Image: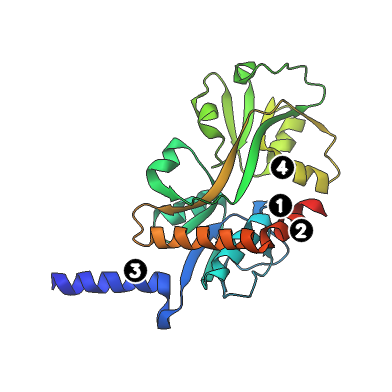
Amino acid sequence: MGYRIYCYTILILTMTTLGFGGEKTVRIATLKDYPPFCMAVGEFEINQTIPPGDDAVGFQGYSWDIIRQSFHKMGYTIHLSILPWTRAMTYIQKGQTDLLFPTGNNTDRQKLFYYSKESVNEVNFVVYVQTENPIKWKGLESLQGLTIGIKRGFNYGNEWKAARGIIKYNVNTIWQGFKMLDANRLDGFMGYEYNWDYVLKQNNLNQKYRKLPFLTGSLEYIVVLKSNPNSRAILNAYDTGKKELIRTGELKHIRNKWFEN
């Protein structure tokens, strides 16, 4: 009986990655409100199946283009779940999805996940304040005793996590953070510079706030739970597909599409 159960378990795990009839599949979870890397546009289905050559419905972004095309180059069909970030993080930890992206690196996450070798995108951490705010930047100690908004579930690096004496206030959306900043309920709002700037520019508000000098930055990757028996195959597929995008010049076209036009 034990041998039968073992064999049945291996079969189910293999079918999750290879699919029925030998089709290679990968389950991917990501967030919907991370422009221009990952963003919902109009109506979209929370769960979508996307075979090679197809694209998601109502969902787009720079990082999504890289992920989709990398896996499609390797012959994978993608099962995409579009979720709030905290729920997506729960999904992968419960084994309800194979990988999560785009994910920054910190010590807590390194305990849970294997990271891809190839990055997906890069972010810079900066603090936004009202233009008339007189604060002078001397590193994180400049924020002692202040209330600083942070987006719930986001990674801001080990230096920020270790900082003491700062009141760190979780917000659910970028807009909530800026509204609280406008209402003087926050002294500052910690952001991912390109993403926060993109949202402000889209709404003609890019001159409304002042950014304190660059704090630090992070590359973001895809991650797979260490206990996932298919982790290495999934990561290798992405890394190989991404390198192929670089080799063929397709990655440059993706970058131009989102950042040069």
* Mark 3 nearby-residue class (10 Å; few <14, some 14–19, many ≥20): some
Name the residue carrying label 3: 13
The reply, left or right, for residue 172 in relation to residue 92 is right
Q: CA distance from mark 1 to mark 2?
A: 11 Å
- Are the residues tagged 1 and 4 within 8 Å (C-beta)? yes
Identify the amino acid type marked 4.
Answer: Tyr
Sequence-wise first label, 1 or 3: 3
SS category of the residue bearing label 1: loop
Name the residue carrying label 2: 257
Q: In the rendered view, tell whether residue 215 sits above or below residue 152.
A: above
Most foreground residue, 165 or 157: 157
- Are the residues tagged 1 and 3 within 8 Å (C-beta)? no
* Mark 4 nearby-residue class (10 Å; few <14, some 14–19, many ≥20): some
Closer mark to the observer between disc 1 and disc 2: 2
Sequence-wise first label, 1 or 4: 1
| Residue 259 picture location, percent across and down | 77, 51
Q: CA distance from mark 4 to mark 3?
A: 38 Å
| Residue 7 picture location, percent across and down | 23, 73
Sequence-wise first label, 2 or 4: 4
- Are the residues tagged 2 and 4 within 8 Å (C-beta)? no
SS category of the residue bearing label 4: helix
SS category of the residue bearing label 3: helix
- Checking the image for residue 194, the label placed there is 4
Applied colour scheme:
rainbow
SS category of the residue bearing label 2: helix
- Are the residues tagged 4 and 3 within 8 Å (C-beta)? no
- Residue furthest left in the image: 1
Most foreground residue, 144 or 248: 248
Closer mark to the observer between disc 2 and disc 3: 2
